[in-house]
Image (cartoon, rainbow, N blue to C red):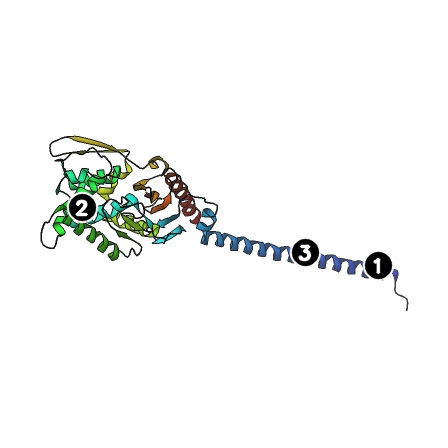
Amino acid sequence: MTQNPRHREHNTQSYALLVILGIVTAIVLLTVFLTENSLKDDRSVSEEIRSQPSRDVFDPVSIEARAAIVWDVKNNSALFQKNDEAQLPLASLTKIMTALVARESVDGRLLVNIDDDDIAVEGDSGFVSGDSFNLDDLLSYTLLVSSNDGAEAIASAAGAFNAPHGEGSTTENRATFIERMNIRARELGLVQTFFTNPTGLDTSQYASGGYGSARDIARLFASAIQAFPNIFEATAYPTFSIETTEHRNIEGENTNEALDMIPNLIAGKTGYTDLAGGNLVVAFNAGLNRPIIVAVLGSTYDGRFRDVSILSEAALKAIAFSH
């Protein structure tokens, strides 16, 4: 029997409609599938970025220092590291341990006398033999101007209190103090750190007065600042004045030329010798009471300031990016 043309036309239209509906449905389903996968990919990438902010921010960083670390004190972890466990000369970063051990050994009101042996060492901090200072004031001044004669006087005075058989000669008292510095380094777990003098001055063209790693210095600086913040506070100032017991005023300038480069600076300490090159450690507040420490070893005299500025800026970006 022959099918009515109208029926054939109707069937053809129905079939075409079904095909169109099928195509539309397939397009809709494909669009939904691709959108969901795109969102998943976006979330995956976003989560990866958040989980590793330091890598992305610090990857392009270029510094002159042989070793460096950016230490997150609150989380007890490194945001960045470069040869951070390499043992290198510390130069005047040694004075951080000098200050910590001195203040742990004796009261901050102790009077410290400057003698001829003290002012005979390299450098001139404006002291004369016979000057006397309050220990806390002398510590702050010594750290800010990196005074070698101040460090020697502090070691001698504090060493006398730790001498096993009572106060000895100046040489004996200093030796006792240096021994205590090395004991304290071991107690703090600073495995690459040891000292042969309280100043960090090179003892020869081959030997430094102190050795340590960038990681050790960051941890030491954190401990010292937390224990005695009032002593290290002055190192964030451009100048600092102290007064002798005879009311003679002495003003010194900060050796840290990166003061204006570091936001919310808490404290800092410089170091430089021919053997060590340029060293610098700073602590700053990254916000919401989150102290960050940046330490560089083995840079150049000027390069250490640029290095710390670059790493501090990258640290702030990494922290902001991770929130």
State the SS at label 1: helix
Query: Which residue has dot 3 on it?
Result: 27
What residue is at 19 percent from the left and 31 percent from the top?
Answer: 250
Q: How many numbered markers are drawn?
A: 3
What residue is at 14 percent from the left and 34 percent from the top?
Answer: 244
Graded by Cα atoms within 10 Å as few (under 14), some (14 to 19) or many (20 or more), the crowding at tag 2 reads many
Whole-percent x, y for residue 55 in the image: 46, 51
Whole-percent x, y for residue 292 in the image: 34, 47
Q: Is residue 42 visible?
A: yes
Graded by Cα atoms within 10 Å as few (under 14), some (14 to 19) or many (20 or more), the crowding at tag 1 reads few
Front residue of 278/68: it is 278
> Residue 9 shows which numbered tag?
1
Q: In which quarter of the view is residue 233 placed?
A: top left
Gap in Å between the C-alphas at discs 2 and 3?
A: 81 Å
Gap in Å between the C-alphas at discs 2 and 1?
A: 108 Å
Q: Earlier in the sequence, mark 2 or mark 3?
A: 3
